[in-house]
Amino acid sequence: MTVSDEGTPQGGVISPLLANIYLHYALDLWFEKVYRKTCTGYARIIRYADDFVVCFQYKSDAERFPEELGKRLGKFSLEVEPTKTKMFEFGRFVVQHAKNKGKKAETFDFLGLTHYCGTRKDGKGFRMKRVTSRKKFTTKLKTFKEWLKKSRSMKTKDLWAIVKAKLRGHYSYYGVTDNMCGIKRFEKEVIMLLFKWMNRRGKRNCLNWEKFNEMLKRFPLPKPRIRVSMF
Protein backbone atom coordinates (compact mmCIF):
# COMPACT_ATOMS: atom_id res chain seq x y z
CA MET A 1 0.00 0.00 0.00
CA THR A 2 1.28 3.46 -0.86
CA VAL A 3 0.14 6.78 0.50
CA SER A 4 0.26 9.93 -1.59
CA ASP A 5 0.17 13.50 -0.34
CA GLU A 6 -1.14 14.69 -3.72
CA GLY A 7 -4.71 14.66 -5.05
CA THR A 8 -7.77 13.16 -3.38
CA PRO A 9 -8.69 9.49 -2.82
CA GLN A 10 -10.88 7.78 -5.44
CA GLY A 11 -14.42 7.65 -4.08
CA GLY A 12 -13.54 9.74 -1.04
CA VAL A 13 -16.30 11.92 0.41
CA ILE A 14 -14.11 15.01 0.09
CA SER A 15 -13.42 14.47 -3.64
CA PRO A 16 -16.75 15.83 -5.02
CA LEU A 17 -16.54 18.88 -2.75
CA LEU A 18 -13.00 19.74 -3.81
CA ALA A 19 -13.83 19.07 -7.47
CA ASN A 20 -16.80 21.44 -7.19
CA ILE A 21 -14.67 24.23 -5.71
CA TYR A 22 -11.78 23.70 -8.14
CA LEU A 23 -13.89 23.51 -11.29
CA HIS A 24 -15.90 26.56 -10.29
CA TYR A 25 -12.78 28.62 -10.99
CA ALA A 26 -11.14 26.42 -13.63
CA LEU A 27 -14.28 25.86 -15.73
CA ASP A 28 -17.48 27.68 -14.70
CA LEU A 29 -16.14 31.21 -14.43
CA TRP A 30 -14.01 30.80 -17.55
CA PHE A 31 -17.02 29.62 -19.55
CA GLU A 32 -19.29 32.45 -18.35
CA LYS A 33 -16.80 35.32 -18.46
CA VAL A 34 -14.65 34.28 -21.42
CA TYR A 35 -15.90 31.59 -23.77
CA ARG A 36 -19.63 32.38 -23.75
CA LYS A 37 -18.91 35.97 -24.78
CA THR A 38 -17.27 34.69 -27.96
CA CYS A 39 -20.30 32.59 -28.98
CA THR A 40 -22.57 33.66 -31.81
CA GLY A 41 -25.71 32.31 -30.14
CA TYR A 42 -27.04 31.00 -26.82
CA ALA A 43 -24.63 28.92 -24.73
CA ARG A 44 -24.97 27.32 -21.32
CA ILE A 45 -23.06 24.92 -19.07
CA ILE A 46 -24.67 22.56 -16.54
CA ARG A 47 -22.22 20.94 -14.13
CA TYR A 48 -22.38 18.66 -11.10
CA ALA A 49 -19.00 17.88 -9.49
CA ASP A 50 -16.82 16.78 -12.45
CA ASP A 51 -19.70 15.86 -14.79
CA PHE A 52 -21.01 18.55 -17.10
CA VAL A 53 -23.08 19.18 -20.20
CA VAL A 54 -22.59 22.19 -22.47
CA CYS A 55 -25.37 23.43 -24.78
CA PHE A 56 -24.89 25.61 -27.84
CA GLN A 57 -27.39 27.16 -30.20
CA TYR A 58 -25.02 27.07 -33.15
CA LYS A 59 -22.83 24.21 -34.38
CA SER A 60 -19.85 26.49 -35.02
CA ASP A 61 -19.68 27.45 -31.32
CA ALA A 62 -19.86 23.79 -30.30
CA GLU A 63 -17.18 22.65 -32.76
CA ARG A 64 -14.48 24.98 -31.50
CA PHE A 65 -15.30 24.41 -27.83
CA PRO A 66 -13.35 21.11 -27.30
CA GLU A 67 -10.05 22.66 -28.36
CA GLU A 68 -10.55 25.77 -26.22
CA LEU A 69 -11.66 23.62 -23.29
CA GLY A 70 -8.54 21.47 -23.63
CA LYS A 71 -6.33 24.54 -23.51
CA ARG A 72 -8.12 25.90 -20.46
CA LEU A 73 -8.04 22.65 -18.47
CA GLY A 74 -4.43 22.04 -19.51
CA LYS A 75 -3.41 25.09 -17.50
CA PHE A 76 -4.56 23.23 -14.38
CA SER A 77 -3.10 19.84 -15.42
CA LEU A 78 -6.62 18.55 -16.14
CA GLU A 79 -8.06 16.85 -19.20
CA VAL A 80 -11.41 15.55 -20.44
CA GLU A 81 -11.93 11.78 -20.66
CA PRO A 82 -12.37 11.12 -24.43
CA THR A 83 -14.46 7.95 -23.99
CA LYS A 84 -17.00 9.84 -21.90
CA THR A 85 -17.25 12.84 -24.20
CA LYS A 86 -19.35 13.27 -27.32
CA MET A 87 -20.86 16.06 -29.40
CA PHE A 88 -24.20 15.71 -31.16
CA GLU A 89 -27.32 17.54 -32.27
CA PHE A 90 -30.13 17.77 -29.73
CA GLY A 91 -33.35 19.77 -29.72
CA ARG A 92 -36.63 20.56 -31.42
CA PHE A 93 -35.91 19.32 -34.94
CA VAL A 94 -33.53 16.45 -34.16
CA VAL A 95 -36.07 13.61 -34.25
CA GLN A 96 -37.25 14.53 -37.74
CA HIS A 97 -33.70 15.08 -38.96
CA ALA A 98 -32.73 11.62 -37.67
CA LYS A 99 -35.76 10.00 -39.32
CA ASN A 100 -34.85 11.57 -42.65
CA LYS A 101 -31.46 9.88 -42.37
CA GLY A 102 -32.98 6.56 -41.28
CA LYS A 103 -31.53 6.90 -37.80
CA LYS A 104 -32.70 7.49 -34.24
CA ALA A 105 -32.15 10.75 -32.39
CA GLU A 106 -29.19 10.56 -30.03
CA THR A 107 -29.57 10.65 -26.26
CA PHE A 108 -27.18 11.40 -23.40
CA ASP A 109 -26.80 10.22 -19.81
CA PHE A 110 -26.31 12.73 -17.03
CA LEU A 111 -26.60 12.11 -13.28
CA GLY A 112 -28.13 8.67 -13.71
CA LEU A 113 -30.82 9.74 -16.17
CA THR A 114 -31.00 9.31 -19.93
CA HIS A 115 -32.12 12.56 -21.57
CA TYR A 116 -33.94 12.29 -24.89
CA CYS A 117 -35.97 14.41 -27.31
CA GLY A 118 -39.73 14.23 -26.85
CA THR A 119 -42.91 16.23 -27.22
CA ARG A 120 -45.40 17.76 -24.82
CA LYS A 121 -48.48 15.87 -23.63
CA ASP A 122 -50.52 17.21 -26.53
CA GLY A 123 -47.96 15.80 -28.96
CA LYS A 124 -46.94 19.26 -30.10
CA GLY A 125 -43.80 21.23 -29.39
CA PHE A 126 -40.43 20.03 -28.10
CA ARG A 127 -39.71 18.84 -24.59
CA MET A 128 -36.60 17.18 -23.25
CA LYS A 129 -37.58 14.05 -21.33
CA ARG A 130 -35.77 11.75 -18.92
CA VAL A 131 -35.74 8.09 -17.94
CA THR A 132 -33.50 6.13 -15.59
CA SER A 133 -30.37 5.19 -17.51
CA ARG A 134 -29.86 1.48 -18.25
CA LYS A 135 -26.49 1.44 -16.54
CA LYS A 136 -27.79 3.04 -13.35
CA PHE A 137 -30.95 0.89 -13.35
CA THR A 138 -28.87 -2.29 -13.56
CA THR A 139 -26.46 -1.09 -10.88
CA LYS A 140 -29.27 -0.17 -8.47
CA LEU A 141 -30.95 -3.58 -8.88
CA LYS A 142 -27.65 -5.41 -8.44
CA THR A 143 -26.94 -3.45 -5.26
CA PHE A 144 -30.42 -4.25 -3.92
CA LYS A 145 -30.01 -7.95 -4.71
CA GLU A 146 -26.63 -8.10 -2.95
CA TRP A 147 -28.12 -6.37 0.07
CA LEU A 148 -30.94 -8.95 0.18
CA LYS A 149 -28.42 -11.80 0.20
CA LYS A 150 -26.59 -10.28 3.15
CA SER A 151 -29.86 -9.70 5.04
CA ARG A 152 -31.13 -13.28 5.18
CA SER A 153 -30.87 -13.43 8.95
CA MET A 154 -32.71 -10.16 9.47
CA LYS A 155 -36.24 -10.24 10.87
CA THR A 156 -38.86 -9.74 8.18
CA LYS A 157 -40.30 -6.71 9.96
CA ASP A 158 -36.92 -4.96 10.09
CA LEU A 159 -36.04 -5.91 6.53
CA TRP A 160 -39.40 -4.63 5.26
CA ALA A 161 -38.80 -1.25 6.90
CA ILE A 162 -35.44 -0.92 5.14
CA VAL A 163 -36.92 -1.96 1.78
CA LYS A 164 -39.54 0.78 2.16
CA ALA A 165 -36.83 3.33 2.93
CA LYS A 166 -34.79 2.23 -0.09
CA LEU A 167 -37.80 2.56 -2.40
CA ARG A 168 -38.67 6.00 -1.03
CA GLY A 169 -35.08 7.10 -1.64
CA HIS A 170 -35.14 5.76 -5.19
CA TYR A 171 -38.42 7.52 -5.99
CA SER A 172 -37.19 10.76 -4.46
CA TYR A 173 -34.20 10.86 -6.81
CA TYR A 174 -35.50 9.21 -9.99
CA GLY A 175 -39.13 10.27 -9.65
CA VAL A 176 -38.80 13.18 -12.05
CA THR A 177 -41.24 14.33 -14.72
CA ASP A 178 -41.72 11.74 -17.52
CA ASN A 179 -39.92 8.94 -15.63
CA MET A 180 -42.94 7.13 -14.22
CA CYS A 181 -42.15 4.09 -16.40
CA GLY A 182 -38.61 3.99 -15.03
CA ILE A 183 -39.60 3.98 -11.35
CA LYS A 184 -42.53 1.59 -11.92
CA ARG A 185 -40.16 -0.85 -13.57
CA PHE A 186 -37.81 -0.59 -10.60
CA GLU A 187 -40.70 -1.31 -8.21
CA LYS A 188 -41.68 -4.38 -10.25
CA GLU A 189 -38.13 -5.78 -10.23
CA VAL A 190 -37.76 -5.17 -6.47
CA ILE A 191 -41.02 -7.02 -5.79
CA MET A 192 -39.82 -9.96 -7.90
CA LEU A 193 -36.58 -10.10 -5.91
CA LEU A 194 -38.48 -9.93 -2.63
CA PHE A 195 -40.74 -12.80 -3.70
CA LYS A 196 -37.74 -15.00 -4.54
CA TRP A 197 -36.00 -14.04 -1.30
CA MET A 198 -39.04 -14.81 0.84
CA ASN A 199 -39.28 -18.25 -0.73
CA ARG A 200 -35.63 -18.99 -0.01
CA ARG A 201 -35.99 -18.11 3.66
CA GLY A 202 -38.55 -20.84 4.32
CA LYS A 203 -39.23 -24.18 2.75
CA ARG A 204 -38.83 -24.28 -1.01
CA ASN A 205 -41.87 -22.76 -2.77
CA CYS A 206 -43.54 -22.13 0.59
CA LEU A 207 -44.93 -18.84 -0.67
CA ASN A 208 -47.02 -18.52 -3.82
CA TRP A 209 -47.96 -15.28 -5.56
CA GLU A 210 -51.43 -15.25 -4.00
CA LYS A 211 -50.02 -15.35 -0.47
CA PHE A 212 -47.32 -12.84 -1.35
CA ASN A 213 -49.86 -10.39 -2.78
CA GLU A 214 -51.88 -10.69 0.41
CA MET A 215 -48.73 -9.83 2.33
CA LEU A 216 -48.22 -6.76 0.14
CA LYS A 217 -51.78 -5.67 0.89
CA ARG A 218 -51.25 -5.99 4.64
CA PHE A 219 -47.82 -4.39 4.57
CA PRO A 220 -47.84 -2.11 1.50
CA LEU A 221 -44.66 -0.80 -0.04
CA PRO A 222 -44.36 2.86 -1.15
CA LYS A 223 -45.93 3.36 -4.55
CA PRO A 224 -43.98 5.03 -7.37
CA ARG A 225 -44.86 8.66 -7.90
CA ILE A 226 -43.26 11.70 -9.44
CA ARG A 227 -41.57 13.70 -6.70
CA VAL A 228 -39.80 16.36 -8.77
CA SER A 229 -41.56 18.47 -11.37
CA MET A 230 -39.20 19.65 -14.11
CA PHE A 231 -41.72 22.11 -15.57
Image: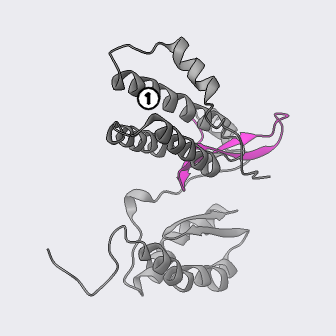
Say which residue appears at 53% left-offset and 57% top-offset: 87
Residue 103 in view of the camera: no
Q: Is residue 1 inside the magenta stretch?
A: no
Residue 137 in view of the camera: yes
Specify whether 203 is left or right of 95: left
Specify whether 20 is left or right of 83: right
Say which residue appears at 51% left-offset and 71% top-offset: 49
Specify whether 37 is left or right of 209: right
Say which residue appears at 66% left-offset and 64% top-offset: 56
Specify whether 136 is left or right of 90: left
| Image: 148 above or below 65 | above
Q: Where residue 8 sits: x, y (%)?
A: 35, 79
User: Observer-nearest residue: 207 or 223?
Assistant: 207
| Image: 17 above or below 84 | below
Amino acid type, label 1: Leu
Q: Residues within 10 Å of mark 1 (few under 14, many from 20)?
A: some
Q: Where residue 44 sits: x, y (%)?
A: 67, 69
Which residue carries the number 1 mark? 193
Write down the quadrant of residue 185 in the picture: top right
Write down the quadrant of residue 80 in the picture: bottom left
| Image: 202 above or below 97 | above
Q: Where residue 48 sits: x, y (%)?
A: 56, 68
Query: What segment is highlighted magenta in the picture?
Result: 104-132
